[in-house]
Image: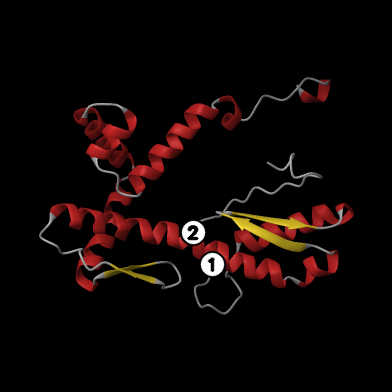
Amino acid sequence: DYSKGQPTAPLVKDTYGSERRKAKTLNFSIAYGKTPHGLAKDWGVTREEAQALLDAWYADRPEVKQWQQRVIEEAKRTGNTRTLMGRYRKLPEINSRDRGKQGHSARAAINTPIQGGAADVVMVAMVKINESPLLKKLGYKLLLQIHDEVILEGPEEHVEEALNEVRSCMEHPWSDDGVGLGELRVTLDVDAKYEKTWYKAK
């Protein structure tokens, strides 16, 4: 009971950090189109065990398999795949008779909308953060971006207000920027924090 001075229970991601990382890796691997062979190699299990894991994963998330199939079919029809903002990647070997080349292209067709879409979100969010009148008024400046993270620098006395503005820019990247995409159908939960030194911010 924290009201009596007792420490709060650790978060799930702290208590089960190793298991959480494994589950995260597995989720991304399958979502990106990992094959039974690749999964067996990565996880050190038999191909049969990997196939059983894939079957169980997709049985619990049938909509993912349906989406992957739609994306691959569209890529075979058009010869390319696209991100959220319409950037496209050509896939000249998506209809190749070589199963290896076709499989590689099919996985690229699945991977590109996911990672490319995430890049779209971050890029637009960075523009909003960089152009935010409030952040400029508070004295905050965007320094750099690392994958899905952004780092800003500014005066400590305005940190809470700045955190809220940055979080809003990242959770609603293009709701009002005229891109024409509107709000995302899924919620983007953003973790935001501040530190006084680079070492503590790691």
Residue at (33, 30) in percent of width and height: 43
- The mark tally for this picture is 2
Left or right of 197: which side holds 179? left
Q: Is residue 136 visible?
A: yes
Q: CA distance from mark 2 to mark 1?
A: 15 Å
Residue marked by disc 2: 118
Q: Is residue 103 above or below residue 1?
A: below
Quadrant in the picture for the C terminus: top right
Residue 175: where, in percent of width, then height? 58, 70
Q: Is residue 141 above or below residue 201?
A: below
Residue 42: where, in percent of width, then height? 33, 34
Dot 2: few (<14), some (14–19), or many (≥20) neighbours within 10 Å?
Answer: some
Left or right of 104: which side holds 162? right
| Amino acid on which disc 1 is placed | Glu
Q: Nearer the viewer, mark 2 or mark 1?
A: 2
Residue marked by disc 1: 183
Q: Quadrant of residue 111?
A: bottom left
**SS for tag 1?**
loop
**SS for tag 2?**
helix
Residue 76: where, in percent of width, then height? 20, 66
**Which of the labelled discs sits on residue 135, or is there none?**
none
Q: Is residue 173 visible?
A: no
